[in-house]
Image: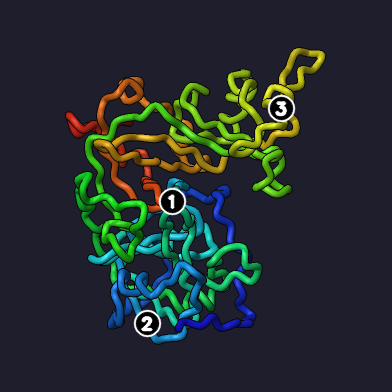
Amino acid sequence: MKKIFAIISAFAALVACEEWEPVFTGEYEPSERYEAQQLTPTHTIQQLCKMYSTSEPWTIDQNIIIAGQVSTDDQTGNFYKSFYIQDETAGIEIKIGRNSLHNEYQPGQWIYVKCLGLTLGMYGYKSGNYGGQGMVQLGYVDPSGSYETSYLESPLLVDAHIIKGAAAPVPEPEVLDEKDLPTSKQCQSQNRNVGRLVTLKGLKYANEAFVLLYLDSQKDTKLSSNRIFVSDAAWGITTWAMSKDRMKEYLHSGIWDEINVGNANDYNYGKVGDHRVVATDGSVSYPDIQKSAYSVSQYFKMGQTEIQLRTSGYSKFSDLEMPADVLAGRAVDMTGILTMYQGSIQFVVNSQADFVYSDTGEPLYK
């Protein structure tokens, strides 16, 4: 029986935040000199993930070591305070509370994780017939209990657990067929492709987009009265995501004014247009709606399977328009990290270079 040990440490991590925030996306800087180490893993990533129970997070009380290669790159801003590593059995997110991680943990580099004292948890699990698996993560204990894991914040804590190995080429992404995709009940424990860098071919736009906005991010974000769901491509979202400035453009155009404010079946709080203010000079504003979209999901189909492409509003390519021929149904191939959220497949790319046309192999963006 796994036990949770209450760990009180001078290195206690801050409360986890699962939304994106601004990240530094500057050019690569040389990492501090270090001596590459090579440890002997005791478990594969999938074996570690199988030790997680969906009933509670586990503060690891065994001398477990895993190894994997870095498969993500936060230089474009599409990954936030974490990176993924992968071996042949699965991939897993390592939650480190720092930006610009590409300078310290470069794509392809071997990483060894001493897991004793870290917390194994899951983000995105939902029970019931319409739920499913999320993603097993490695982080630190969350003192607030809001999330199953938090970030490793202290440099001493990070260096004690995250060991840098030798540089290596980025792992070659495996090309998946539809039959290789996880079901709603599979995470890394049951499907080796989850958490790994893979290529999905022949995806076609599903004419569906989704973004969740808040009237006030300082208030309870689960309150119906504080939530706005923009959940249809008819509302004009034709970019991969949206920056703060682009979100203002969408709002000020008035295209969202008829969207209801509310949550699920509780839409009793008026419409976005009720928050529209026109000044005497004719300028338009929405003073009580947050002007930040953390992420946008554009939906694609791979055969009969829906793929939710999730992109940060802080990424460098967030405001790029999706090409008209893609919106019209021309197939694309995408390379990125395959993840799960409440039983649905989510996909996150490293950069705009990860989009190519299926028929020619040419990049969508030159």
Q: Residue at x 39, y 41 (%)?
A: 308
* Three-letter code for the amino acid on which mark 3 is drawn: Gly
**Closer to the camera in the image, 145 or 131:** 131
Q: CA distance from mark 2 to mark 3?
A: 53 Å
* Three-letter code for the amino acid on which mark 1 is drawn: Asn
On the rendered image, what quadrant is the N terminus found in?
Answer: bottom left
Residue contact between numbered discs 3 and 1, judged by CB atoms under 8 Å: no
Q: Nearer the viewer, mark 3 or mark 1?
A: 1
On the rendered image, what quadrant is the C terminus found in?
Answer: top left
Q: CA distance from mark 3 to mark 1?
A: 31 Å
User: What percent of the width, then of the height, locates residue 354?
Assistant: 31, 41
Classify 169 as above or below 236. below
The local secondary structure at tag 1 comes to loop
Label 3 CA crowd tier, 10 Å (few <14, some 14–19, many 20+): some
Which residue position is annotated with label 2?
64
Which residue position is annotated with label 3?
270
User: What percent of the width, then of the height, locates residue 31?
Assistant: 42, 65
